[in-house]
Image: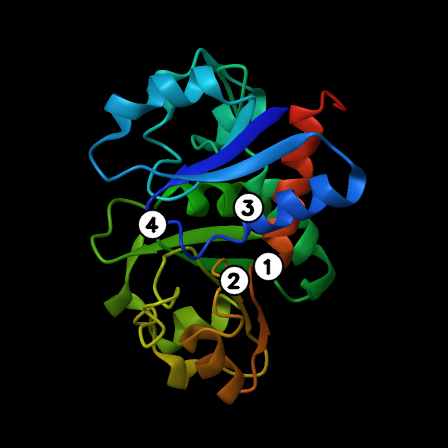
């Protein structure tokens, strides 16, 4: 019996256990996938046991960057991104970017050249990497912007018009916090905009609902989740 899982906090929203355990049952794989909610601040106390007891695991917020010092090395993609969502044999990988690119590629229009990426955590790093691979220039948006970023108060009509893709990489709107959303000027959106939410639970977040009301194309993160999970399994099963 092989043992896999996911670390993060909180984890009650995660679909990963359901996805992998159904896969194992359907394909007759002798394995189990469990949730490992690591309380914020306790990663140092628990990571050693997790690394030694699991055959592989996923990493979700808030540990996609924090887990790196405890690993022996990163693969080339994770190194370039600076965030990890898959661990196998003490090595960190990033498959978030693959899942994002696969789900985003069919949606990109000819005029999509610039994107606003909301949030600065591990998910945003993978999204920015994926956008660049798709030929789209990303700009980070933060409540506390640093050099090269924008603050939410800088999202003028001109800025919104130039950035036709907006990706939410924050946890705002995620179950159970369904009444929250990023503080962008939704009234400045139009049918030319594509709103992509890395959150997948609920299926349609307030961020997406407000975009749809403005005529935007909308997409949640469920396909990104499935894409990164399939890529994670290829790593764990030594298929790549």
Find residue 152 and report its horizontal and vertical position in percent. Answer: 28, 66
Q: Given contact means CB atoms under 8 Å apart, are the residues at marks 1 and 3 in contact?
A: no
Tell me which label, 2 or 3, sits earlier in the chain. 3
Rendered position, 20 above or below 109: above
Badge 2 marks a residue whose secondary structure is loop
- Disc 4 crowd rating (10 Å Cα; few below 14, some 14-19, many 20+) is some
What residue does disc 2 label? 200
Q: CA distance from mark 1 to mark 3?
A: 14 Å
Q: Give the CA separation, mark 2 to mark 4.
A: 15 Å
Q: Residue at x 32, y 30 (%)?
A: 66
Q: Which residue is drawn at the image coordinates 56% and 86% (left, top)?
A: 215
Circle 1 packing at 10 Å, graded few (<14), some (14-19), many (20+), is many
Nearer to us: label 2 or label 3: 3
For disc 4, the marked residue is 10
Q: Secondary structure at mark 1?
A: helix
Distance from label 1 to label 2 (Cα)?
A: 5 Å
Residue that sits furthest to the top in the current view:
72
Q: Residue at x 63, y 42 (%)?
A: 229
Mark seen at residue 164: none
* Residue bearing mark 1: 222
Q: Are marks 1 and 2 in contact (CB under 8 Å)?
A: yes
Q: Position of residue 200 (x, y in %)?
A: 52, 62
The answer to which of marks 1 and 3 sits earlier in the sequence is 3
- Way the structure is coloured: rainbow
Mark 3 or 4, nearer chain start: 4
Q: Point out residue 40 in the picture as x, y percentages from the top left corner.
A: 23, 39
Q: Which residue is mark 3?
A: 17
Residue in the picture at 74% in, 60% down? 106
């Amino acid at each position: 019996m092989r043992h896999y899982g996911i670390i993060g906090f909180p984890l009650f929203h995660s679909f990963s256990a359901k996805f992998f355990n159904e896969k194992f049952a359907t394909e007759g794989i002798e394995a189990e996938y469990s949730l490992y909610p690591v309380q914020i601040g306790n990663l140092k106390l628990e990571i050693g046991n997790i690394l030694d007891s699991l055959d592989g695991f996923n990493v979700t917020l808030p540990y996609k960057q924090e887990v790196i010092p405890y690993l022996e090395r990163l693969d080339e993609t994770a190194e370039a991104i600076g965030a990890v969502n898959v661990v196998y044999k003490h090595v960190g990988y990033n498959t978030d970017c693959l899942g994002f690119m696969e789900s985003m590629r069919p949606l990109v229009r000819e005029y999509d050249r610039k994107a606003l990426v909301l949030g600065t955590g591990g998910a945003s790093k993978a999204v920015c990497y994926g956008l660049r691979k798709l030929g789209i220039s990303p700009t980070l948006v933060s409540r506390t912007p640093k050099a090269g970023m924008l603050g939410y108060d800088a999202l003028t009509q001109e800025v919104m018009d130039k950035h036709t893709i907006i990706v939410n990489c924050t946890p705002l709107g995620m179950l159970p916090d369904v009444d929250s959303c990023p503080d962008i000027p939704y009234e400045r959106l139009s049918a030319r905009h594509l709103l992509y939410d890395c959150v997948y639970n609920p299926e349609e977040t307030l961020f997406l609902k407000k975009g749809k009301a403005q005529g935007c194309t909308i997409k949640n993160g469920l396909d990104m989740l499935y894409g990164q999970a399939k890529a994670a399994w290829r790593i764990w099963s030594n298929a790549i």
